[in-house]
Image: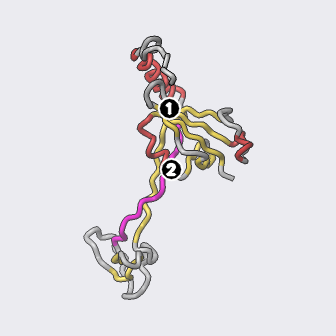
Amino acid sequence: MGTEVLPSSGLYIDQALVDTYRESIEQLVSDLGRKVNLHLPPQQIDCANCEYNSVTKRSNNRYTPNASGFNTSFPLGGTCPVCLGAGTLPIYRNFIYTALVRRTPNDLNYEFYGVDPTTVLRLKTVLSTYQDLVDAEFVVLDGQKYIKLAEPVLTGLRDNAFVVSFWHRSP
């Protein structure tokens, strides 16, 4: 049926050009990029002041002194004053990344999806940030909070070297 008649790979774009492209975009991100504060979901750690009940997924409201010295005693059956009875404490995580920022990108017809295009950000950054961008709850840029519009997309010339993500301003 159909045979492929494409020229062999590397005839016009060799590895040196691919490397130059990758290095140039990395330099653009470094030189022209903006600092973006990426907020990830909090991790939960067991409260050091009380015992965690894995069956009820809450504190069993029993004071357990520890060696850290940061103990707050409470009566048996009372609510732990540190975790307020949750048994765990959130550890909030955020990272600052450098990314190329494009406001009001024209990649898509955002109005078709019910999104005002003037509230959209397009971020392009290095591949090492991919998993954090997937996990992120929101980003902050210039004091404005933006929520994820779509999952991040891997991009590059011949190989995936960068991540593009789309965000829209939170109401």
Residue position marked by numbered label 1 in the rendering: 155
Residue 94 to residue 12: above or below: below
**Front residue of this view, candidates 1 and 31:** 1
Instruction: Report the number of discs.
Output: 2
- Residue 88 location (% of width, % of height): 40, 70
Q: Which amino acid type corresponds to the residue marked 2 in the rendered image?
A: Ala
Residue closest to the far top:
11
Task: Return the x and y of residue 45 as percentages of the image width and height.
Answer: 37, 65
Q: Nearer the viewer, residue 80 or 42?
A: 42
Task: Specify which label sits upstream in the sequence, 1 or 2.
Answer: 2
* Magenta range: 35-48
Q: Residues within 10 Å of mark 2 (few under 14, many from 20)?
A: some
Q: Residue furthest front?
A: 1
Identify the residue at horizontal 58%, vertical 48% (top origin).
148
Which residue is identified by label 2? 136
Task: Identify the image quadrant of residue 69.
Answer: bottom left
